Amino acid sequence: MKKNIPFVVLPLIIAGCSSGGGENKDNNVIQEKKVDVISNNPTSSLNKEEGKRVNEALNKEVNEEVNEEVNKVTNKVVNEVVNKEVNEVVNEIVNKEINRIDEKEDAAEISNDKGISVDEKLLSDNKEKVYTGSKIDKIYHSNWDYGKENIPVYNIEGSKDPYENYLSSEEKIITFVTDKGDSHQFSLLGDVGYYGYRIELDADRTASYASYIYSIEKDLIAENVPNDLNAVYSKKDGFVYGPLDHRSDQINAVVRTADITMNYTNGIVKGVITENDPHIGNDELFKIDGNTKSLVITPTRHVSNGIIPNDRAAMDIQFVNSAENIDDHKYILGTTKAESWVGVLAAEKQN
């Protein structure tokens, strides 16, 4: 009897022996029974179940690790693709904005070379212009804030009744400075304003007189005029003037024009106002002295129409720039009145 045969098969062996079979036959039976018994062994089933659970646990762990690695790789690839696309879009937007800013800065730099930026130029063109100026006559000296396109003037006519000496006037608005009439005349001063005169009626409507006027854009007034200014200013018909007679109003509506030349040297000015009537000549009608704040205008012996020689008058002057943010003191304007005359002055800097 073999020692390695399990105890459970011994009854089968005994039963075989009692049947009188041969040894080989008995061995075959033993082997067959051994297989059957082992296959039906509860321990074997337990091993299979345990192996199944072990395999499931291992498979789950392996799957989790594999999935984690796969997800890492997948996420990396996806993130790289998404980041690339996002970066391309963002870079495109950023580059466009940078180019726009660069173009704006370049345009501003180009314009700044001329003394004014693009944005400032647009704002200057779009905003409403405000005018300021001066009006002077035999009675009053007042402010004048009418622009170039809305100047009030008068049409003055004599009475149609031969037994009346009254004058009549009708106010109207001229929309162009260069519109001329029998009772007014104005001249442009570059693009910054205008100067000239208009005829008005006395309160009793029996006589007329001239008012001398200038008007400029308020934002163009020069505020930083150097005290040591060196420049030449001149203008043909730049001085508009007339006589004053406080005893009679017959000549107070007489208006004349003359040419002006002024030379500033270290802030001190010398100049002359000359006759511009070729039939009379180019006599010096007035002499000019002063500085960058004011002028003193003195009539010479060549003046006429009742103006008294040496009847000098002080004139506060206004320097005006040719455009905003350009400090070039391009123009000079002023009004003044003496005992025997009154007038307005306009001059332009010469390059």
Image: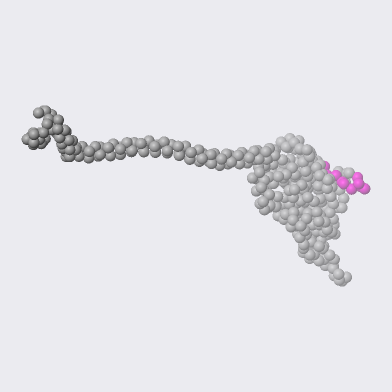
Q: How is the image coloured?
A: one colour
Q: Position of residue 230 (x, y in %)?
A: 75, 36
Residue 272: quadrant of the picture: top right
**Viewport quadrant of the N terminus:** top left
- Label tally: 0
> Is 157 on the left-hand or right-hand side of 330?
right
Front-most of 341 and 208? 208
Q: Position of residue 287 (x, y in %)?
A: 82, 43
Q: Position of residue 112 (x, y in %)?
A: 66, 39
Q: In the image, what residue occupies the spot 81% across and 66% down?
A: 168
Q: Main secondary structure of the magenta part?
A: loop
Q: In the image, what residue occupies the spot 65% across and 42% down?
A: 117
Residue 137 is a magenta residue: no
In the image, farthest residue toward the right:
279
> Is 67 on the left-hand or right-hand side of 39?
right
**Viewport quadrant of the C terminus:** top right
Q: Is residue 224 visible?
A: no
Residue 269's place in the image compared with 256, above or below, is: above
Front-most of 289 and 229? 229
Q: Is residue 40 visible?
A: yes
Front-most of 320 and 289? 320
Q: In the image, what residue occupies the spot 87% across and 46% down?
A: 275
Residue range highlighted in magenta: 272-281
Q: In the image, what residue occupies the spot 16% across and 33% down?
A: 28
Residue 164's place in the image compared with 42, above or below, is: below
Residue 6: quadrant of the picture: top left
Residue 278 is a magenta residue: yes
Residue 148's place in the image compared with 332, above or below, is: below
Q: Position of residue 345 (x, y in %)?
A: 78, 48
